[in-house]
Image (cartoon, grey):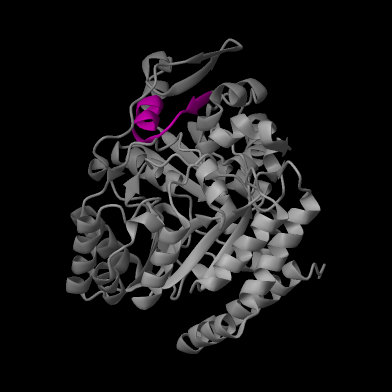
Amino acid sequence: MASVFLANAPYFLEERYGKLAAVGSTLPHMGLLMLGAVLRKSGHRVRMVDASALGLTYEETIEEIKKNQPDIIGLTAVTPSIDRTVKLAYMIKRIYPFVPIVIGGPHFTAVPQKTMKDYPVFDYGVIGEGEHTIVDLVETLASGRTPSTVPGVAIRENGKIFFSPPRAPVKDIDALPFPAWDLLDGFPHNYHPALFKYKRLPSTHIISSRGCPSKCIFCDTSVFSRRIRFHSPEYILELVDYLVKKFNIKEIIFEDDQFLLKKKRVEKICEGILRSKWNITWSCSGRVNSVNDLKFLKLMKHSGCWQINYGIESGNQRILDFAKKEITIDQIEKAVRLTHKAGILSKGYFIFGLPYETEDTMQNTIEFAKSIPLDDISIFMLTPFPGSEMYDIAEQHGRIDKDFEKMNLLDVVYVPNGLSKEILLNYQRSFMKEFYLRPRIIGNYLKRLASNPLNLYAMGKGFFAFLRHIFKLNN
């Protein structure tokens, strides 16, 4: 048995969300939860600290490591947090120079060779889905052997970097244990979604499928691959039952890229929720071309679904086609109108700055969003993440800043030909002002507040954060 310490490096809300920190998410890292679960199931002692979600400092995170005296340390990183993860790793190495440090997560999987080369503090890396790999790696290291035959691993040995054969994605995801929420400090009350992504607390998120077959050029699918695999309705219902009874969870966020793809599966989940009498609310994300059935949406509504998030990206068909979204403007409008008719709120995710973006296309997108019954929006700046097709072709269509720390969807790291950073930011602020400062939207938010006055303080913070952002206020 080995003692394993798993951590997500400090990454404060202010660093992640800027002026919108007051509405940011502190949900736990799902990858760590799964690694902790499989390691514990294999008999290892596991301590897990999500420093980012808890707002811990580097020093506080190091103190937790000292308390546990681990044999192996596992760290995870997304692209904008890789520098923070490296900083934490070097702090650990100064105290425990002989304890192996393993890096994993989306950023490492996207650029494993570069990460191992640029950051010699990492001894090993886990590429792709990590559940089977981390167990094999920990057991191999604990026995004193070199993990050269463990699939899916990067190895640093005598100053050289080696890669073992790749590991195939997990076929039967129902065979995996439930995420190890019970290993988190203060779960669920120390963790919450972004302000307008929930109606009730305590709330948490789950992933009910893996992989995405879509080919959007701005997405990195290197961790879960393009091969989609679903948890069965029975697994999901048992998981929700566990969360409700063990942690008194009142709301679930389904974070799948393609939750609505298999209608029969979603129907069985909805019917199971209705039979259970849990009285939970839930939300999900879906593609607009998966929504064309009002009866189906009404079943979702009846079972507690209150919001569906749609990746709309743009109101310009040429931009959508270039981005390989494989959706049409008509499909967007039909999905949003059907969702509204079913009594479910809809949120649109938009991206400004894709190739062929102009001031006219951005204004057209704003007008389109206002013409359909959307209830909420998020406007991101195009971020060509490593591992995405857009990262490889970015310089053909504009200028890219490859500073990983700025790749957070909020900073402007990519400017398409013909535009400037200032123009993109001005249209983002205009979009928020024109969309939200309308009687219908303000009225909707007042109704949501009236239905749950406990959110008054949080909504107040969110409203002032919104004003600071759109009017460029410093305080």
Query: In this orientation, which residue lies closer to the viewer: 445 or 45?
Result: 445
The image quarter containing residue 143 is top left
Q: Is residue 406 above or below residue 141?
A: below
Q: In this image, 229 relative to 324: left or right?
A: left
- Kindly identify the residue that appears in the image at 37 percent across and 41 percent down: 211
Q: Which residues are magenta?
A: 124-138
- Kindly identify the residue that appears in the image at 65 percent across and 56 percent down: 361
- Kindly identify the residue that appears in the image at 42 percent across and 22 percent down: 141
Q: Is residue 258 above or below residue 306?
A: above
Q: Residue furthest bottom?
A: 450
- Observer able to see residue 14: no
Q: Which image quarter holds the C terminus?
A: bottom right
Q: In this image, 37 relative to 396: left or right?
A: left
Residue 136 is a magenta residue: yes
Q: Is residue 122 above or below residue 77?
A: above
Q: Position of residue 69 (x, y in %)?
A: 52, 37
- Observer able to see residue 98: yes
The image quarter containing residue 389 is top right
Residue 474 is a magenta residue: no
Task: Tell me how many marks there are.
Answer: 0
Q: Position of residue 401 (x, y in %)?
A: 73, 37
- Kindly identify the residue that appears in the image at 69 percent across and 32 percent down: 395
Q: Which image quarter holds the N terminus?
A: top left
Query: In this orientation, which residue lies closer to the viewer: 65 or 260?
Result: 260
Q: Position of residue 217 (x, y in %)?
A: 52, 39
Q: Residue furthest right?
A: 474
Q: Is residue 364 above or below residue 223?
A: below
Q: Position of residue 247 (x, y in %)?
A: 35, 66
Q: In this image, 25 relative to 246: left or right?
A: right
